Image (spheres, rainbow, N blue to C red):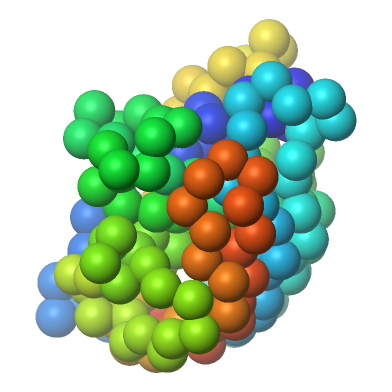
Amino acid sequence: MQARCFVGSAIALTLAGCAPEPSDPLVGDASGSFDCEIFLPGANPANTGDGAVTVTLDGRERVLAQSAAAFAIDDADNQTLDPATAIYFAVQVVQYVSETTLEVFEVRVLPDSWVADTVLPFDGEDVVGFFGTVTFDANGTAVGAEIDASSTDGELTLGEAGRDPRAPVSGTLVVELAGD
């Protein structure tokens, strides 16, 4: 179920996501790291990796540390195994908070900026981050998604920036967040 939830949460956050308006009030921050691979659907065991992101919103701290995965996403907002068709790369660090609710911190990076050993600003264009929740039905199908906050400022440091399935991806992030 977890592998399917990653893909479902990527699509759900894609449908719900957009960069914040400059007038959004600052509500928190996030920091953490990830060390994973470009996700390969159907891999057994699932090729998720390690990640830990601490998100603080309105004084409430959450630690997302269950697992991490990276994806190449095409122009139909689907995961692609061909990195040449990717319109962005994404990393998700997740934590189940119940059997039907998953908290997700997702970073999206445009392909020209997805380069190893680089420091990138969260600028709302080339690099953007989101924190939100995805809800699932009893069958593990994503049925809802909500973005609580989006990045407004900060830095993403990519150590490794693999593009092909099972290629390594690693990095750290420190980011300010704004939301409704």
Q: Could you tell whether 128 is left or right of 131 in the image?
A: left
> Image point 65% across, 59% down: which residue?
168
Q: Where 49 sits versus 43, above or below? A: below
- Asked whether 32 or 141 is in front, the reply is 32
* Quadrant into which the N terminus falls: top right
Q: Quadrant of residue 111?
A: bottom left
* Furthest-right residue in this view: 45
Which residue corresponds to the image point at 62% horizontal and 52% vertical from the top-left?
A: 167
Residue 93 at what x, y percent from top left? 64, 57
124 on left or right of 52: left
User: Which one is in front, 34 or 159?
Assistant: 159
Identify which residue, 58 or 2, lies in the foreground. 2
Q: Is residue 66 above or below residue 31?
A: above
Q: In this view of the protein, can residue 145 be seen by the observer?
A: no
Write down the quadrant of residue 148 in the picture: bottom left
Write the residue at 14% across / 80% down.
23
Please indicate, yes or no, whether residue 153 appears anywhere in the rendered image. Answer: yes
Query: What's the residue at 51%, 45% (across, down)?
Result: 164
